[in-house]
Amino acid sequence: MKVVFENLTKAYPSRDKKKGGEVIAVNNFSFEIPDGKLIGLLGPSGCGKSTTLHLLSGLQKPTNGRIYFGEDDVTDVPAENRGVGLVFQNYALYPHLTVMENIIFPLQNRKGKDKLKKEEMHEMARETAKLVQIEELLYRKPNELSGGQQQRVAIARALVKKPSILLLDEPLSNLDARLRLQTREEIKRIQEQTKVTTIFVTHDQEEAMSISDLIIVMKDGVVHQIGAPQEVYDNPNNLFVATFLGTPPINLFKGKIENNKVYIGDNAILNTNVEDVSEVTVAIRPEGFLPVENGSFSCNLQRVEVMGRDISVIAEHECCEKPSFRAIVRSENLISLNGNTVSFDVLPHKVFVFNPNTGDRII
């Protein structure tokens, strides 16, 4: 099922009674989500991603704009009639019910021609439990399960009613690091197996990029970029997207463009055909540094961290916007680091240049 947002806006009354006005949680959002894809809705806390999910599910109504499922306008359709499966951050399982009873709960509310026999509901629950690999847990209570198992029960409950759209609201935030990795892989497997259109809300860019077909990056209710994860990482539209994506984060330096070269301090690091600009922000991905003797970018060496496959070089430069910056280099590429300085060449496709006032990308 494809999903279409058409000028979607959600505004709330301001809690500041003196100033009045409105708080815009989602601002004029238009996009078409292709059928059968897994979409990562990504951004910092308060950016509007959960509000967007609630508008999709029908839990909230938009202030302006329309929502379409396929060709059907569902903007005014009640939540229970939208055919949506919603998985909450805190699982929202009924503690007094078994796993089987939790899964079949949404099926018990069917009426008329859609009403199911008990045997049919149990069979559907068993099939769904097998899909999420919890078939041996059907007669346990939620308090007898681990966090990862409870999350699978919540996903099974959302899937058992055969939704046309699956919505996941920060589904991994309550899990430890190992379970997060395992469960996100399971979510991808389940989505590929069921082919259900899935929207996955998270503030964790690594989660979104690892399993999504497309990511939507939001801030302050505004969509900043939409695209395939690698495409967005390699070609950020603006400074916010560049800084939000990437672990370790991108390194920022004060620079300028002069005589068809990008400068950081006195170091000309990149050729360009852009006209002179007196002040720019130069952003370099940690993996964009290549240590070489007499490289174009000279820095003060702070320390070296050995990480096995890679080496992390921590260095200082007077134009860096933070006290230090981090370069990630392959261990075989590391030159002999003697003394207090280190020099790099930078990989052009890992360097981005932005207007420091607007955040717009220049190069």
Image (cartoon, rainbow, N blue to C red):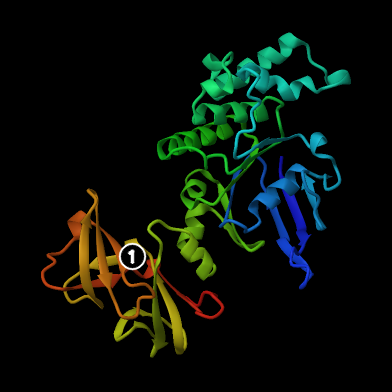
Name the residue at 57% across, 23% down: 142
Indicate whether 335 appears above or below 176.
below
Which residue type does callout 1 highlight? Gly
Which of the pair 230/313 is nearer the observer? 313
Name the residue at 27% across, 73% down: 316
Which of the pair 213/175 is nearer the observer? 175
Which of the pair 16/146 is nearer the observer? 16
Expressed as whole percent of the image width and height from the top left, the position of residue 159 reads: 66, 28
Name the residue at 29% across, 77% down: 317
Indicate whether 257 appears above or below 237.
below
For residue 102, which quarter of the picture?
A: top right
Expressed as whole percent of the image width and height from the top left, the position of residue 161 reads: 72, 26
Name the residue at 47% across, 45% down: 210
**Left or right placement of residue 293 versus residue 24 in this view:** left
Question: What count of labels does the image hold?
Answer: 1
- Provide the residue designation for mark 1: 288
**Left or right placement of residue 109 versus residue 183 in this view:** right
The outermost residue toward the right is 112
Expressed as whole percent of the image width and height from the top left, the position of residue 277 reads: 46, 88
Label 1: few (<14), some (14–19) or many (≥20) C-alpha neighbours in 10 Å? many
Q: Secondary structure at mark 1?
A: helix
Is residue 182 visible to the viewer in this orientation of the structure?
Answer: yes
Expressed as whole percent of the image width and height from the top left, the position of residue 98 reads: 62, 17
For residue 18, which quarter of the picture?
A: bottom right
The outermost residue toward the front is 18
Indicate whether 332 appears above or below 18.
above
The outermost residue toward the top is 119
